[in-house]
Structure formats: C-alpha cells, structure tokens
Image (cartoon, rainbow, N blue to C red):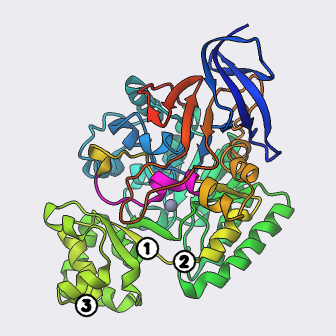
Amino acid sequence: MKYNLLIRGCGIINGKSTPAFKADLGIRDGKISAIGPLPDAEAERVLDCPELILSPGFIDIHTHTDFTILINPWAESKIRQGVTTEVIGNCGSSAAPLCGEKLVRVQEQNKDLVIDWNTLGEYRDRVNIQGTAVNLIPLTGHGNIRASVMGYDPRPPGREEMNRMLELLRQSLEEGSWGISTGLVYPPGVFSGSDELVELLSEVSRFGGIYSTHMRNESDRVEEAVAEAINLAEKAGVSLQISHLKAQGRRNWHRIESCFRKIEAARSRGMDIHCDRYPYIASATDLDILLPSWTWEGGSEEELRRLSEPTIRKRIRDEITKDDWESVIISRVTTEENWKLEGRNLKDIAADRRLEPVDCLFDILMEEELEVEALFFGMSRDNLERILKKPYCMIASDASARADYGLLSRGKPHPRTFGTFPRVLGKLVRRGVLPLEEAVYKMTGLPAEKLGLKDRGVIREGAAADLVIFNQAKVKDRATYQNPHLYPEGIEYVIVNGEIVLEAGLQTGKLPGRFL
Ligand SMILES: [Zn+2]
C-alpha cells in the first residue's frame, strides 16, 4: 500500500489517556490507515520525527470563531496551537440563525463583514465558499433564537413566540447543529426562565445534542447557578457542559468545593455532565458586564440612554459595589481616541482622568457606545489546578481564531486566544499538574466522547487524520496579557483531514477543514 503521508518514529499518544508508544503512522485519503512498524512502506511524503510526540489534533470544545473564520479562513491562532476542530456558537451566541433584531445587531457589531445569511445552512455555504483550515462543529446560540423572535424584551415568551423559537432551533438541528448554548448573564439570555429553557433543551435532547452553558452567575451565586444548570439539563434529559467553570472573586473562591459536590452528585446519578476551562486566572468579556442586568433591558440604545440620564446613572452607581478596579483591564475599544486605553486598568485610567473609577467606567462605555472588551482578574490559581484535574474537565480556549496581522490582530485579546493548549502541555504538565497523556486526553478523546464524535480525537486505524506533532521538551505558550499576539513554540506539524496545514512551525496555506 502506498500512503499519501508517512510519519516515522514518533512517540504516539492515542488520545485515550494510556501511555505513549513508539510507532509509524500511514495516512491515506484523509484517514489513518496503518499504525505500527512500517519499515518498507512507500509514501508520497515522509516525515521523520523521532524526537517528537504525535497525538490527535486538539478539539477546542468552547470557541467563538463563528465570525472570524469568515475574515480569515487560516485560523492561525488555533492551528499554531495544534487545534484541528473547533466547537463554535458558545455562550448563547452563534452565527445562525440570524433574523429580526438579532440580525440588525450582529450586522452593527461586525462592520467588516457582510451578513448575507439567516440560517445555519446558508452560513455553512458561506464558510465553505472561502474554506477553513480547521474543522467546525456548530452549536446554536439560545440568544440567536430568542432575539431573532422577540428581540431584547425582558419578559417570558408567549406561546406563539415559543413555537417560533422551537421551529428555529429544530431547523438548525436539522441543518447540522450539534446542540444549544446559553449565555445567561448576557441579554437576552438573562431574561429567560426555566420553562422556556427546559422546552428548548428537550428539543435538543431529542436530537441527541449537547447543552453548553455560560451560567447565570459565576461569583456570589455560582452554586445556585450550577444547581440551575443541572436541574434544567436533568429535566430535559440533555448532556450538559458547564462553560469555563470558575468561582470569580476572592470572596467566592471557597464556593468551588460545593460546585464540585453538586456536579459529582449529579454524575453519580448517571447524568452526563462535563465542564471546560482555560488555563488562566483572568476572564474576558464585554466591559458593561459590570453594570446591573436591568440596565441592559431593551438593547444598547436604552442602555446608553440610562447611562446618560443623571438620576438613573446615580441609581446604577449605587448598585455597583466593586472595589478592586485595578483588576479590570481594558482590552479592546472601538474609537481611535481611546486606543491608548488598551492594556490599562480602570483604576489608573480613572486617576488620569481625575474621576471615581465607577464614573470613568460609565464614561468609557458611553464614548465607545458599549463596544469595549475587558479582562477581569479574579480567579484563584489553586482552584484552576483543581478544576483542570477533575476527570470531567476538558481544556478549551473560549476564544475566537485570530492572527498576528490584519483585522484579527486588533486590540489586546485574552492570551488564551494564542496560548491555551501549549500552556497546558508546557507549563502545567512540567509543573506536574497533569500527566502528559491525561492532558492530551482532555484536549482530544474526552471532548470527542462528549460530542459523540466517533472518528476524531483518537489515533486508530480508520479515524480521520487530524493530527498534531509537537516537541514535548520545547512546547510552550508565549502570549501574555500585555503582548497577546505571540504564537506558541514547539508545535511542529498540524494535519487536518490528512493535509499538512502547519509544517516546521509555519502555516502552509491549505484549507482542508470542513463542517462536521
Ligand atoms: Zn462564556
């Protein structure tokens, strides 16, 4: 048999948490066709990698690459980390469906893109025309369904609206969505109650899909939020993935214990529950997450109006009890005048402007018409390690694909965007937080099992040839909060559907990814 590609002499980690072994690997027609000693095999191309480790390509089960893949199909920040498949559409927000008020808002937020689709099928066609370096697994954002039908109204849906939401969800699932995600801290997810969610999740369960949730609270009320997530998933009989599990804020760090207990009790009842986590102790999201949730009702215009009206502004001011303003770092603004704020913390900016930090927050939100992203330092390093060690925790970036050039190099994104997977393989494995094989399992076999993805995330004959070859002695992340656009080191080759997309650390320009 002649192979398209033959990889010789690697240490193979098969994605199942079992010890590495030495073997050759033959690839033909996009699939792994032989594993073992292949001394006489012929191939169009041979890679000799005796010092390197070969494992399944990483499955990034929590990402936001929905729109950026249309801006840049090469997905550099992910490919360079060894990611070969991304699960998009997380935290309640996906590229489809897009109708009504949701469509209007998404077009406003993505000025560099012409949004010419409504459905998942149409979005997929659009991506396929341009191509993609990574494989994509789409989830359906609950926020898309809700805002497409009822805008940003802070009320439960009527029966007609509920039926329309179910219809949009069903259509997405029929067109290839793998499940649903919620963002219950963001509008419009924040306005949704249990009846609505259980009805939608039951539909997902009928299709065998998963439920991924950015929970209603990740700080003072994180335990209630975990209980709510479990309760909803249990009622609907759906597989649950808790997104970026954390207990935010020093005063809440101890709460992680009882979150573990709740999750583990549900697992021992037979529920299918996992979580994902990025290996950093700062989170990243929109700056206006600091405002009380009632200020978001009715959409951005209403929110801005509230900030500009002195009496309402005072009421908001009174409700914000935050005191650690130095822990909030502006990471991305829209106006050129404020570019200098990127990378600086709110306490310092407020001191420069001779303002109270809370007023400075309001001013920046108004200047930028709410389009500001920030980093929030509030997580415990101990908890991070304990979460990552849990057998039900998968490694995921919670980031969109970016690059170190062009439109996708703007701002200061969270370093997890460029560093997540090499950071775990390098720093955390070397420090002994996880054995190498187990770390790889949490990036490959485990997310594949969660998704029911049978022929990826594992090295075996017949499986898709999504592979990464890395140097365990050299692998490390380089991206920092101040300098986040740095690609990692030590990821040598990345192969997607049998094609080499990264060779000796450089991208080949190939786009062999596809929707799964
Ligand atoms: Zn999230």
Q: Position of residue 125 (x, y in %)?
A: 42, 26
Asked whether the beta carbons under mark 2 and mark 1 sit within 8 Å of each other, the answer is: yes
The boundaries of the magenta stretch are: 410-423
Quadrant of the image for the C terminus?
top right
Q: Position of residue 299 (x, y in %)?
A: 31, 64
Q: Is residue 329 left or right of residue 202?
A: left
Q: Residue 43, located in which quarter of the rendered image?
A: top right
The residue located at (43%, 39%) in the rendering is 75
Indicate which disc, 2 or 1, sits on the residue closer to the N terminus: 2
Indicate which disc, 1 or 3, sits on the residue closer to the N terminus: 3
Q: Position of residue 118 (x, y in %)?
A: 38, 37
Task: Identify the disc placed on residue 376.
Answer: 1
Looking at the picture, does residue 512 appear above or below residue 376? above
Asked whether residue 95 appears in the rendered view, the answer is no
Asked whether the beta carbons under mark 3 and mark 2 sit within 8 Å of each other, the answer is: no
Q: Which secondary structure, mark 2?
A: loop
- The residue type indicated by label 3 comes to Glu
Label 3, on which residue? Answer: 356
Label 2, on which residue? Answer: 248
Q: Which secondary structure, mark 1?
A: strand
